[in-house]
Structures are given as C-alpha cells and as structure tokens.
Amino acid sequence: MNYSVHTLILGSGAAGLNTALQLKSLGVDDILILTEGLDQGTSINTGSDKQTYYKLGMYGNTPDSPVQLAGTLFNGGCVHGDIALAEAALSVRGFYNLVNLGVPFPHDRHGQYIGYKTDHDPFCRATSCGPYTSREMCLKLIDAVKRADIPIMEQRTAVSLLTVKDRAAGAITLNENGEFEVFRAENVVFAVGGPGGLYKESVYPAVHTGAIGLALKAGALARNLPESQFGLSSVKFRWNVSGTYMQVLPRVISTAADGVSDEREFLPEHYAGAGEMNSMLFLKGYQWPFDTTKIPNGSSMIDILVYIETVIRKRRVFLDYRANCAGFSFDALSREAYEYLEKSNALFGTPLERLAKMNRPAIDLYADHGIDLSKEPLEVAVCAQHNNGGLAANDWWESENIKHLFPVGEVNGSHGVTRPGGSALNAGQAGAFRAAEYIAARYREYSLDETLFEQAATNELAFLNQYLTRNRNSNDWQAERLEFQARMTAHGAQIRGENVCTAAWSQYTRLLEQGTQWRGPNGKAEALRNLQLCLAHAVYLEAIAASIRQGVGSRGSALELYPDGVELPGIGWRYRMENREFRSQVQMTRFDNGEVKNYWEPCRPLPECNGWFENIWNDYREQKIYE
C-alpha cells in the first residue's frame, strides 16, 4: 500500500510526540505518526530510582540563565555551542509545556519548581516526578496528540528510510501482516530512539531496539558515536540500580552460569575490607554511570569488577538484599555513607529492611514485575543505557547532510562526553520545538520530485524482497542478533581496545549474501531489523576503532585498554589516559558506498548573546533567523 503525507514522524517517544503536537499548533495538519506501538519504545518503558528531567533553574534566588545552562552542556566536551544554547533556551518552554499537559513535577505553595543536584550539575537544576518521569511525559503527550486528532498508525516496523538526491523522501514499513507499505513524505521526523538492540547487556527496554541503522544506510552523517553511558542494571527486569538500590549496601555475589552453584562474594578480592568496599558501593547510588575519572580508587571500580565476573569469567552477578555481606559494620563505613544512612534513620538491619525504610516503592517496583527481593537475589550486569552520540544535526535539528530529515530524541547526537543527568529528556523536548518550527517556516510547501521518489521506492522494495528470499543456508535471526549483540557488549561497551571490525563486517556481508531464517510476519520484521542493526553495530565499531587510532584515550563511560598505558592496580590491566585536546572536537562518521569515513571537526563555540531587541525582532519578522 502507498501513502502520501506532508510530514512523517517515525517513532512515538516523548520527542516524536511533542514534534507532532508542535507541528499541529503551527498549522501543519498533514502529519502522521508511525510506530511499533504507543506502549513500545524507551520513553514509556524506562526509568530509574528517581528519573531526572534537567532544566533551567527556577527556584529561589539562585541565579541562572540560558547561557549558563548552555555552558554546563558545552563544558561536557565535544558539544557544539549553538546546539547547547538552543537546548538551554528551549528548556523552560519545554518544561512548562509538559507541566501544562499535566505532568506532575513538584512545586511549592508559591508555584516555584524545586530542583536538586544531579551528576555533572553545578546547580540544583534537576527535577523529577518519580521513577517513571518519562512515562508520565509520554502518557500526557499521547493524550494531547489524540485530542488534537493527529493520526497514528501502530504495529509498523520501519525497514527503510527513503532518500532522493540527498534529501529525505519517506519510508517503507512492514505492517502487522508482514506487508510492505510505502510512505511518501515532504519531511521525515526521525524519532526512533537510541541503539538499544545493539547490546547483549542492555537496560533499554526489551521492546526497544532502535533504528539508527536505517539513517546510516542512507548516508546520514553521525556525530560522537563512541560516546555512550553504561552502568549497573538488573537484567530480568531492565532497570537502573541507582540511588537507594546501592545506598542500602546490598550483598554482592556471583555464581556459576546456572545462577545457583558456586556462590561467592567476589568484591572483597579487590578491597582491603568490608568498610572500604561498602563505601564504594554506596557511592554507586550517586555515581551510577561508569566513569573513567572514578577509577582506580573510585566507585567505578565496582563496574569493572562486575564486568570481569560476567564477561570474562562467564559468571552471573546478583545483588542480595536479604543479608549483609561478610564482615559488615556500620562503623567501618566512610563518613559520607554513615551520615547518609544515619540521617535516613537506616543504621539497622538487612539491606532489604533499610530499603523498606528509605524507599519502599523501590521494592514494590520489582514486585510489580514478578521479582520478590525478600525471596530472591537481583541479577545485574553493566548495561548499555544511553548513546550520547547519534545522528549529526544542526541547531534546528535538521540532518547536516540530508535535507528534510529531522532526528529528534536520543537518535540525535547533540550530547558529548559527559552530560548532566536528565538532560536527554530536555534535549528531546527542545529538539521537537526546533524541528517543528523550522518545518513550518521553511518546508511547508511541497518540493519532492514524485518521479524520483517512485524510482527510489521501487528499487528499495526490490532489494528488500530479494533479501528476504536469501535464507536457505543461513542462521535464524535470533542467533544472528545474539552474535552482534555479544560483540558489542564485549568490545563496544565500557571496556574497549581490541579491533573487531573485520568480524563485524564479515557478519554483515554474510547477512547480505545469505539472509537469515525467519517465520511469519514477526520473523520477517525481525530479519529486516537485523540488517540495519548489524550495519549500525559495524559502523559504531568503526567509529570506536577510529577514536582509538587517533589516541583519544579513556573518557566518559569508555575505558581503553592499552599495553603501554597506566596500570589498573589489582586488576592487571593497563589503560590509556584521555587526551583532553579532543574535548574541543566532535567525531564525525559516515557510511558511504560501503566505506566508513571518520574525521574530526572543531566544536563551534557558544554564541555571543549581545542582541538588541529591535534588530532581533526585525530578523524574526523577516524569518532571517532560519537562514
């Protein structure tokens, strides 16, 4: 079936939904949302102990401004200043839009929205409405989209991004019956989320895999692909074990692969005593993401020890809240950990009893997903959580090299090495406003050559149909997916060093030539999904390898093993320290005619804000701001 629409929105997370709403408010009515399901994706299925939304400070007499907030985002390294300023400037508008839609962010009796300090945050800009903040955002946005009568087509899997002469032209999807559908579009808002399907160990919800590979295949430029966040998360039910999950000091154990036999506490092998070990464990609550600046004597050694246990030793790791560790003593804790528990009236009992005192909903959350922390330990691993990089777009969120393509949300690589916790939620909302405004101002008229579109769609459909027939001597799609996911977890996650690009491309070539086994409409969709995911993992690994060759070193959530580097005490590893000169550059990546090209560009500085009202008003009226 064939469809035509002015602006096509791929994805129904918080960023895509808000883009649709803003387009509608600006008079762009011919829009359509395509999604695998309104209940699918990361935004509506994820959270943490206190999921954070990062915004401009707006409480009390603490001074703040868009320029100051932009500086915080910019100072994380490898960030363009104009994009940081746009995210900062739209922060208040995006936040109050959510408030007006009914997202219950807390305020005091005077209407001030209180904040708290999050990671990489010099002020108390963070806020939250609980562990399901992004879910609440989605639910309210979905209600608003439905009230606005914006059409939504669910149970659609995007399998191709169509382009014509370096511009977006639409997409091809599979519906629930396994039938191809072709969508012609003047503009494509690409709101497909992060690369959750690339990793074996992932805290992305199982229903979310991501689709950045579709844009990479089309030749879209990417930015900072190696920059991601990883951290300890539960695996049976995917959830970050941050905050009080760590601050109550659970017993950390590992077992053989069967999950039962050969149980032991493995962290004491590295620490001088239970007090030192538990003090580091406590800090993981604050310092959840793996961070190379917090080794060798910081809390991120916990992540490394878990990685060794799970990936290298092939064992399984659990947090046991039913008992304290061997040699446990409150008096042996660091002053910070002791005083925190003391102020929380939690200097007693087992980890579970302390958790019940400090954060009972944290226990209920797992109970709601079939995990009783009083009866079983919680299996964890170091998991992929967020890609700070993604597709390269300008400060109007339009792709840098494919016109009419607007990556919004996590798939947009607007972040750098580090970012304040919760800034991704703000970036998605800010990007939605920017993309919608630019489309309404510059791309309202139709300009797509229909003949060229039909040719592109016909060629792509022929390729997809031919690919699906190449499955006689191939593996099933599940085995193929597990292969590249295991490769990414072992070599493209928080521990890096070995170049496995040849193996990655070998798998992708095999998929292209031999296809994969599949059955039924769902299998058909997964077989095609594998193709873009496998391509994406190869491109990511090429970007990582280029970063290593260039000598960027260990930074953010990535530790680069290096034979001539600094020794990691007690582990036997050596790693390369960061070359901070690269903080002033962004890494660009493009898949072009079967070749991956990587290069570095200098970060654009923060714009000067010394405007004069009459001049800016004139530029706004004459639409010069879009030039």
Image (cartoon, helix red, strand yellow):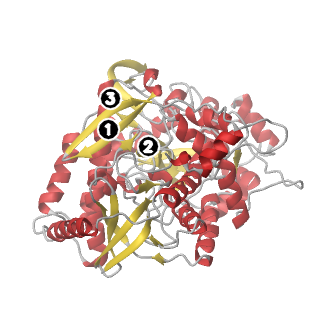
560, 350: nearer the viewer? 560
* x, y percent for residue 537: 30, 48
- Compare marks 3 and 1 and give the one earlier in the sequence: 1
The kind of residue on which mark 1 rests is Ala
Sort mark 2 into few (<14), some (14-19) or many (20+) by Cα contacts within 10 Å.
many
Mark identifier at residue 389? 2
* Secondary structure beneath label 1: helix
Residue at 51% in and 71% down: 39
Q: In this image, 553 relative to 353: left or right? A: left
Q: Residue furthest right?
A: 109
Look at mark 3 in the image and give the residue it sits on.
548
What's the CA distance linking mark 3 and mark 1? 9 Å
* x, y percent for residue 507: 19, 51
In this view, the mark in front (3 or 1): 1
Does residue 313 appear in the picture of this structure? no
Instruction: Place residue 338 in its image quadrant.
Output: top right
The answer to whether mark 2 and mark 3 are in CB contact below 8 A is no
What's the CA distance linking mark 1 and mark 2? 11 Å
521, 474: nearer the viewer? 521
Quadrant position of the N terminus in the picture: bottom left
In this view, the mark in front (2 or 3): 2
Sort mark 1 into few (<14), some (14-19) or many (20+) by Cα contacts within 10 Å.
many
* Secondary structure beneath label 3: helix
Mark identifier at residue 543? 1
